[in-house]
Image: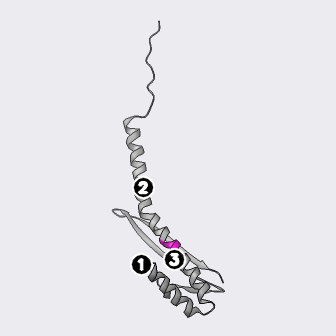
Amino acid sequence: MKQGWNKQQGMSLWGVLAGVFGAFFVFWIAIKVVPEYLEANTIQKCLEEARAVGGSNFSNVQQRFGSCLDVNSVRDGVTSKDIALRGSSVSVSWKKQLSIAGNASLLLEFEAQAPK
């Protein structure tokens, strides 16, 4: 009978550690990025609501947008004075820099628009 070595199958310890580290890194980034996108969605909804309720009066739109930001506790550095009238729509854009680790950071750029 021929005796041979059976090939070992499965992951090595280094493979498992690399997988755990990769999953941890993705989880770490998601913890920092997901709340920013949720807040951007809130700002988009506030802008659409302010445009719908404020009508064509730009100062009313600014006032409604500011009050909506206050009610929803948006503290992202976006204020009612940041919105701009572009043609028949209003828009606001902002940037958010997130520190990942040490001197590594992630820059997120957002823009919300509400057509007429």
* Residue where numbered disc 3 is placed: 43
Closer to the chain start, of discs 2 and 3, is 2
Q: Could one spot residue 91 in this view of the protein?
A: no
User: Magenta stretch: residue 85 in it?
Assistant: no
Q: Secondary structure at mark 2?
A: helix
Residue that mark 2 sits on: 27
Q: Amino acid at mark 3?
A: Ile
Query: Considering only order in the chain, which callout, 2 or 1, is on the residue closer to the N terminus?
Result: 2
Q: Earlier in the sequence, mark 1 or mark 3?
A: 3
* Crowd around label 2: few <14 · some 14–19 · many ≥20 (10 Å): few
Q: Which residue is mark 1?
A: 75
Residue at left offset 40%, top offset 34%: 12
Q: Amino acid at mark 1?
A: Arg
User: Which sits in the foreground, 79 or 107?
Assistant: 79
Query: Of helix, strand and loop, which one carries label 3?
Result: helix
Position of residue 7 in the picture relative to residue 53 (left or right): left
- Range covered by the magenta-colored residues: 39-44
Residue type (three-letter) at the residue carrying disc 2: Phe
Q: CA distance from mark 1 to mark 3?
A: 10 Å
Position above or below: 111 against 79? above
Q: Position of residue 77 (x, y in %)?
A: 43, 80
Looking at the magenta stretch, what is its main secondary structure?
helix
